[in-house]
Structure formats: C-alpha cells, structure tokens
Amino acid sequence: MDNSINFSIDMAPLMERLNKLEERIIQSSQKSWLDEYPNMLTVSDMMEILDIKRTKASELLNREDFPVFRLAGTKIPKHLFVQWIESHTEWINQNTKLSSRKAI
C-alpha cells in the first residue's frame, strides 16, 4: 500500500508577483533626490533646490521662459522645472550652486 500524496503547485502566479516586487524594489532604489519634492514646487522648494536667494528667485520667476503657474499661488510644475534646468544649463551654472549637486 502506497501512502504517498501527489500534488502540484502552479508557480506562475507566485513568480509573477515576485517579479513585480523585484521591479518595484529596483524602481525605488533608482529614485532621485528630487523625488522628495512634490509635483508642484513652491518658491521655497525651488530656492532650496537651486541654492539661491529670494532676489535670484524673483529674477527667475519673472523670466518669460520659466515654467511658473500663478493661478493657485506661485507654483512650479516639477517636470517642467527639470526640463527648464536641462535646457538652460548655462544660466544654472552661472547663477546657482546646483551644478555641484547630484545630477537631476
């Protein structure tokens, strides 16, 4: 008389969940220091990121090409801010200390 029990386990759902978890871990480890900030930056956030004072911030906020949203107070959309920085590296290098920090 054979008392063994045979069963099979479908590992596919478990492997799928494991792969998704691994992807999330990889994504979270690749976060930038900029991810600590909200999607709509305040003027203070912008000043902190660029390491500039109020006078330089006012100059920047008054530029026609700078992405500022004024309908709900003065806010800067983070994704547009990053794009602006990437396309205005000369201004950044001349006016801020950002170039000495980690790349965005």
Image (spheres, grey):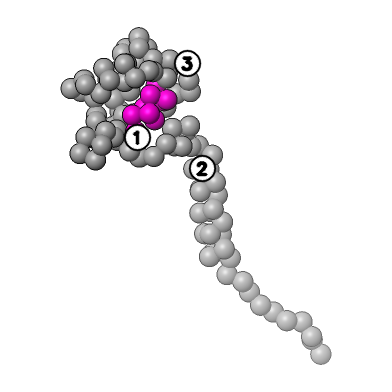
**Res 39 visible:** yes
Q: Secondary structure at mark 2?
A: helix
Give the Cα separation between the discs numbered 2 and 1.
21 Å
- Residue at 24 percent of width and 40 percent of height: 72
Q: Report the residue marked by disc 2.
A: 28
Report the quarter where the C terminus lies: top left
- Residue at 29 percent of width and 33 percent of height: 76
Sequence-earlier tag: 1 or 3: 1
Q: Secondary structure at mark 1?
A: strand
Q: Which residues are magenta?
A: 41-50
Q: Residue furthest left?
A: 64
What's the amino acid at mark 3?
Ser
Dot 2 surroundings within 10 Å: few (below 14), some, or many (20 or more)?
Answer: few
Quadrant in the picture for residue 97: top left
What's the amino acid at mark 2?
Ser
Q: Which mark is residue 75?
A: none
What's the amino acid at mark 1?
Leu
Q: Residue furthest right?
A: 1
Q: Secondary structure at mark 3?
A: helix
Q: Which mark is residue 100?
A: 3
**Residue 87 % position (x, y):** 29, 21
| Nearer to us: label 2 or label 1 | 1
- Residue at 66 percent of width and 77 percent of height: 7
Identify the main secondary structure in magenta.
helix
**Res 89 visible:** no
Q: Report the residue marked by disc 1.
A: 41
Dot 1 surroundings within 10 Å: few (below 14), some, or many (20 or more)?
Answer: many
**Residue 40 % position (x, y):** 33, 38
Query: Is residue 19 shown in magenta?
Result: no
Give the Cα separation between the discs numbered 3 and 2.
24 Å
Sequence-earlier tag: 2 or 1: 2
